Amino acid sequence: MQLTVRVKPGSRKGPLVEASGDDLTVFVRERAVDGAANEGVVQALAAHFGVPARDVVILRGHTGRIKRVEISGIDSVQVDR
């Protein structure tokens, strides 16, 4: 399943995943330095959906705040958590 996520790096709220319509907002404590925020996004999404981190892949947006991610091993029904 592919999702669009908006990332808020350096957030005190993180790690947290909030749903807003069809998109997700991911708050992570890590700053956007040397890929730390991307790793935080992968970890937060894996924990939120209950899948291993290896099943979460960032497809596009590695250097931006809006990312396209693919999550393997879940149905689209589980997104409504």
Image: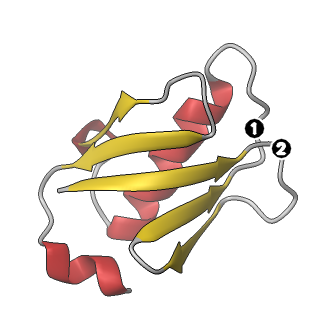
Determine which residue is flagged by label 1.
30
Amino acid of disc 2 = Gly
Disc 2 + disc 1, Cβ < 8 Å = yes
Label 2, secondary structure: give it.
loop
As displayed, is residue 70 above or below residue 51?
A: above
As displayed, is residue 51 above or below residue 67?
A: below
Count up the numbered dots: 2
As displayed, is residue 64 above or below residue 40?
A: above
Label 1, secondary structure: give it.
loop
Q: Is residue 23 left or right of residue 77?
A: right
Residue 45: image location, x then y, percent: 44, 56
Residue 68: image location, x then y, percent: 37, 42
Whole-Å distance between the Cαs marked 2 and 1? 5 Å
Residue at 73 percent of width and 59 percent of height: 14
Determine which residue is flagged by label 2.
10
Q: Is residue 67 left or right of residue 15?
A: left
As displayed, is residue 56 above or below residue 35?
A: below
